[in-house]
Image (spheres, rainbow, N blue to C red):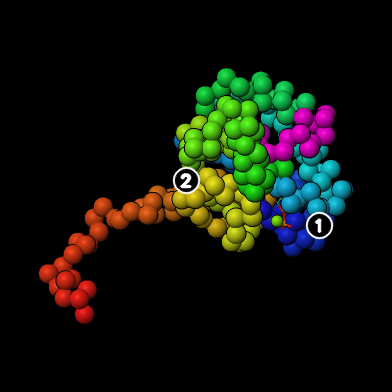
Amino acid sequence: MDGNGRWAQKRGYPRIFGHIRGSARVRLIVRAASELGVKALTLYAFSTENWSRPEGERSVLWRLLKKHLLREADELQRQNVRLRVIGEVERLDPDLQKVVSAVVDKLKNNTGLQLTFAVSYGARSELVRAAQLFSQDCLQGIRSTSDLTESVFERYLWTSVLGDLAGVDLFVRTSGERRMSNFLLWQSAYAECVFIDTCWPDFGPHHLRGAIEEYSRRERRFGGVSAQGPEFTSPHSEDILLK
Ligand code: IPE
Ligand code: MG
């Protein structure tokens, strides 16, 4: 969800206005995702690098998160949305942590859209933490180094709570930036990326639908070859190889 600050600055408002409007878009997009049949939606709300922002801006972001969690809890319950929060949750203010766990707990039996907020999230810290947890298990004799496979490693990532839905199919970034910025790097290894020039406060259900349509036109080969691709060999291939 990028471009809140620029959205506001372009209109001559302070950045905070972009965050206010941006946070209000979340409910629209969550509802649209549910209606479009999206199974899992993970929103990058605050990165480990965002801690470097001024304290005033950080505190606005936390207040907005708290306000919307409290305000939307009943509506999310009605929509059968399951909520999770991944990232360094322990770094949040204890009061916000309590709100987060209360809302997560309230929605824990829901089976609809699996909504995840990445908060104080960084893919590199997630990977380092996973390596630390795995090493601890090895030291305690719960695991041995030869157990380590990709699927075992994934169990140590924050996203393991999403089970089969942890892998990213579609990665959408708003605001025209074309980078991953430390988001779900492991999980996005084969994600289809869609970059949208619109800033997050103007991102609407039609943009989400458009991104999904774009995704559905992509051919995902996962390093393989196209099912209806050309023949691998031709009558002349031996001659060409030998030249
Ligand atoms: C995204 O908007 C919101 C958060 C990172 C919390 P930005 O605040 O990054 O907006 P820009 O990129 O400065 O326009
Ligand atoms: Mg930004």
Relative depth, front residue between 82 and 222:
222
Quarter the C terminus occupies: bottom left
Of the image marks 2 and 1, the number of the one nearer the N terminus: 1
> Which residue in the structure is indicated by mark 2?
169
Residue extending furthest toward the right: 56
Q: Residue furthest left?
A: 235
Q: Looking at the image, is mark 2 or mark 1 nearer the viewer?
A: 2
User: In the rendered image, which residue does mark 1 sit on?
Assistant: 13
- Front one among 48 and 126: 126
| Magenta span includes 96 | yes
Q: Amino acid at mark 1?
A: Tyr
- Residue 40 lies, in percent from the top left, at 52, 36
Q: Is residue 103 above or below residue 89?
A: above
Position of 64 compared to 198: left or right?
Answer: right
Label 2 vs label 1: CA separation?
A: 35 Å
Report crowding for label 1: few under 14, some 14 to 19, many 20 or more residues within 10 A (C-alpha).
few
Query: Magenta part of the protein: which range?
Result: 84-97
Q: Is residue 74 left or right of residue 156?
A: right
Binning the other alpha carbons within 10 Å of mark 2 as few (below 14), some (14 to 19) or many (20 upward) gives some
Helix, strand or loop for disc 2:
loop
